[in-house]
Image: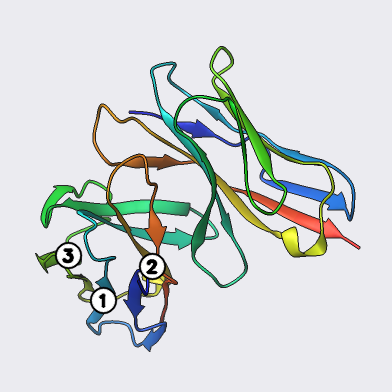
Amino acid sequence: DAGVIQSPRHEVTEMGQEVTLRCKPISGHNSLFWYRQTMMRGLELLIYFNNNVPIDDSGMPEDRFSAKMPNASFSTLKIQPSEPRDSAVYFCASSLNPRGGYTFGSGTRLTVV
Amino acid sequence: AQSVTQLDSQVPVFEEAPVELRCNYSSSVSVYLFWYVQYPNQGLQLLLKYLSGSTLVKSINGFEAEFNKSQTSFHLRKPSVHISDTAEYFCAVSDPNTGNQFYFGTGTSLTVIP
């Protein structure tokens, strides 16, 4: 298995633009998680899905952020409009069950200028 | 909800010296415990985990962690560190009774000094 695949690896965009981050989880994993990592706040859970259904989105910072999982093999995290304070590394992770732990993707480094 | 405390945000240690990274969690109910490692500019990788059974668990690169239920701790240790161990280490806990969500600590930055 290729693991959790995220794209793009790097994204530089101007303030006010829409940004879409993509994630392909490991085949068969039924839970998917979006995290944001910054120096100031560390690792923050934004939202997670179980069987393609959003379970907890309390970590989504504001309405500019939205996430979807239209099927078991694909998820997107969208920021519209983007702001400089959204600059961070965004990780996607997937899991089959609590015993197995999470498998993380390599992350998307987002820079909003 | 669970919470995880990693008291040491930064740990510098000389090469070949021993190291201990501390982790405490909030609940004494049955939990699963994990250590993840993040090398610079990479994602988090599972280092080792405790599910049940023997309280001492080991990784393939010489790290070990011991589950202590009475102290609700899961400290990570290595008897002799290498330069390549320089990384961020995250402790995480999951409660199998409340679903698939993990709770991560704030991380400990281990720097191995030549």
Up the image or down, A84 lies above or below B65; here it is: below
From the image, tell me which residue sits under label 2: A90
From the image, tell me which residue sits under label 1: A22
Q: Residues at marks 1 and 3, common chain?
A: yes
Up the image or down, B12 lies above or below B6; here it is: below
Task: Report x, y in % for residue B73.
Answer: 58, 25
Q: CA distance from mark 2 to mark 3?
A: 13 Å
Up the image or down, A26 lies above or below B10; here it is: below
The picture quadrant where one finds residue A75 is bottom left
Res A72 visible: yes
Q: Give the residue displayed 35% in from the left and 71% down from the top.
A: A1
Which coloring applies here? rainbow
The picture quadrant where one finds residue B48 is top right
User: Three-letter amino acid code at disc 2?
Assistant: Tyr
Q: Are marks 2 and 3 in contact (CB under 8 Å)?
A: no
Quadrant (top left/top right/bottom left/bottom right) for the C terminus of chain A: bottom left
From the image, tell me which residue sits under label 3: A66
Direction from residue A90 to residue A59 in the image, left or right: left
Foreground pick, A63 / A26: A26
- Of the numbered discs 1 and 3, the one sitting upstream in the chain is 1
Chain of the residue that carries numbered disc 1 in the rendered image: A
Q: Give the residue displayed 56% in from the left and 25% down from the top.
A: B54
Mark 1 neighbour class, 10 Å CA radius: few under 14, some 14 to 19, many 20 or more: many
Res B106 visible: no
Mark 2 neighbour class, 10 Å CA radius: few under 14, some 14 to 19, many 20 or more: many
